[in-house]
Amino acid sequence: MRPKEIRYIPRNLKDLLIEMKDTSELMVDLAYSAMVYDDEDIAEEVMRLEEKMDTLDYHMKIAAMLSTRRVEEAEEMSGVLQVARASENIANAAGDIAKIVLMDMGIPMELKLAMREADETITRATVGEDSTIAGRNLEDIELDTEAGMWIIAIRRNDEWIYDPNHQTRIRPDDVVFARGHDEGVPLFIELVTGHKYVPRTIQHERFLIDLERAVDIIVEMKNMGELSVGLAYSALLFDNDDIAHEVKALEAEMDSMKHELQHWVLETAKHVPDVNILRGLLQLANSAEAISDAAYTIADTVLRDIDLHPIITIAVRESDEVITKLVVQDCSPIVEKTFGQLKLETETGVHVMAIKREERWVYRPNKKTIVRAGDILIARGSHTGEEALFEMCACPLDDKNDS
């Protein structure tokens, strides 16, 4: 099979970097969707997007070389290429996850169910005739702020719409795939179907008792991989050494978890009639660890104090999923409330990755974490969600006038 020929087309560096970041993150979401729902169509789309990433990477390298004339410019551009390479590596890891479906590798049902309870879960639902979102476009629906979910794909009869935009109109009988916080799933299901959410109970044979620890490790690796990428872009955007060092620490922890996972899988193999059912677990662990490695590649530009081209921060801010920073004022209504009470993910669609409290960092805050005045929140989500977060945290007008 002859390699695909790529012809150079002049492209803007910023647009290329934004497209590479958005495409790689979309691929990860689609790849996990394909794995959870055994969907070969989605897996094939991931492989098609991987080819697209190869093309984008080629154009990025040519554009970078053409844009430098002096050593100083070349040094700045090295950081751009390092971030682009990380996006390409994330895309490759997503492709490896998709191959689990295409190569019919084994994935225990326990893991598919557990994946739906991860920090950020993947879910799907069919649009009902009496659904309030039927006939409306995504800009009007604003599912990210209504349910804390982000639509990544729509299946319409035999056609697919991947990475839909604000103007995409939802129709009855569309099958909608979305990503978001697990607390948003009931809200999402009710909005899409038009019916009350009823949790499904799936009966399955629990013959992999020894594998329970391995399943826990895989889910944690997925969570940590996605956290690493978000924190890496945060370190880049805010030029923050502390966050970059946390990404480095997470990468080292991911290595240890992968080795532990390999041990558990080998232990379980002695009790499983067909070891093929375990192959997918090893592939998933390798992919999650590769995503963490790519995140470290991004954070490394901060740790090595590379002079970053301003185009990088512009691209991170203008991509589909934005990174934001918010300082909690004394008069903010969220002060002294827990994240469980605030339900930020479902109310704004924004996921808080970290909090800086005085000189200490709190990563992955949970439902019991209390918000304090002076906290600096580092979060990611849509542009609409960012606005909703600022509005939710803003001081009452009376307090502003008094100050």
Image (tube, helix red, strand yellow):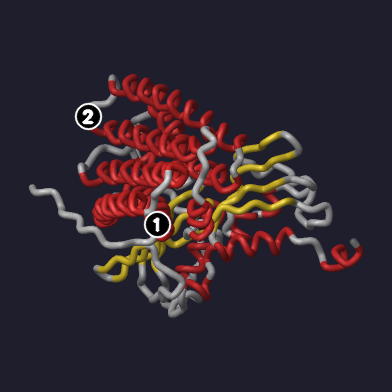
Q: In this view, does 313 lie above or below 258?
A: below
Image point (13%, 49%), residue name: 3
Q: In this view, does 67 lie above or below 169?
A: above
How far apart are the two marked residues, 2 and 1, measured between alpha carbons? 49 Å
Q: Residue at x 9, y 49 (%)?
A: 2
Does the rendering let one see residue 16? yes
Mark 1, Cα crowd under 10 Å, few <14 / some 14-19 / many 20+, is: many
Question: Which sits earlier in the primary sequence, circle 2 or circle 1?
Answer: 1
User: What residue did someone put label 1 on?
Assistant: 13
Residue 194 location, x and y as percent?
48, 71
Q: In this view, does 135 lie above or below 1?
A: below
Q: Is residue 325 left or right of 228 when viewed as pictured?
A: right
Q: Residue furthest bottom?
A: 135
Q: How many marks?
A: 2
Q: Mark 2 — residue?
A: 274
The amino acid type of the residue labelled 1 equals Leu
Left or right relative to 334: residue 91: left
Q: In which quarter of the image is residue 290?
A: top left
**Label 2 environment density (alpha carbons within 10 Å; few <14, some 14–19, many ≥20):** few
Q: Determine whether the residue tagged by mark 2 lies in a helix, strand or loop.
A: loop
Residue 359: horizontal and vertical position, in percent? 73, 34
